[in-house]
Image: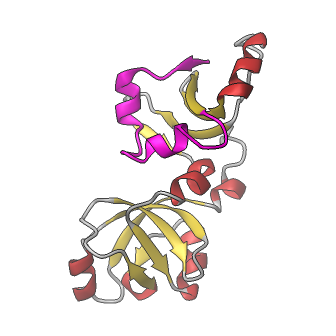
Amino acid sequence: MRPLTEEETKVGSIGRNIAHLIDRPDEPYCFRMQKDRVYYVSEAIMKKATSVSRDQMLSLGVCFGKFTKTGKFRLHITALDYLAQFAKYKVWIKPNGEMSYLYGNHVLKAHLGRITEDTPEHQGVIIYTMGDVPLGFGVTAKSTADCRKLDPTAICVFHQTDVGEYLRDEDTLF
């Protein structure tokens, strides 16, 4: 495991709120990279893990995502609980659209319950149920103002990943 480089931190960053994840009041945490995956782990556990050889280490902490071969960072659903705490832009979907989203479909205007004011187009968002349970990640297809004008079958949020991924892709998550 190695620390992320400055460039990797910028590409995989969650913005200014990354400081809230690292400098926690209970104990300090850090991001470490093993092969192409980025892990979020407490510094105490990370120091203990130095006694394990790299080829024997499968995972350490919570996998936040991985870098693709093209150098882009792809978030994994395992990071949802941590990122949902600090999300600036949120989308809530109605109960009739929850299962559709959990099966990997985009969020339609008919399923849109609420959306954070002034959310720009092509912005990363956290998808919630109307009861504030985080379901996954998405990217807005239209801004908040444009979503109000759409017809019910138009796509408001593009699906990226959801908690159903635990079942669909459990063999590739780790």
Which of the two residues, 152 or 59, is positioned nearer the viewer here? 59
Residue 108 x, y percent position in the rendering: 40, 79
Residue 103 visible somewhere in the drawing = no
User: Residue at the location (61% across, 43% down)?
Assistant: 25
How are the residues colored? Answer: secondary structure
Relative height, residue 41 to residue 132 (above, below): above
Q: Residue at x 44, y 85 (%)?
A: 113
Is 41 or 59 nearer to us in this picture?
41
Q: Where, by quadrant of the figure, is residue 71 drawn? A: top left
Within the magenta stretch, is there residue 27? Answer: yes
Residue closest to the eye, 1 or 75: 1
Point out the stretch of residues depicted in magenta. Answer: 1-28
Q: Observer-nearest residue: 100 or 6?
A: 6
Report if residue 15 lies within the magenta region: yes
x then y, percent, for residue 174: 69, 37
Q: Quadrant of the N terminus?
A: top right
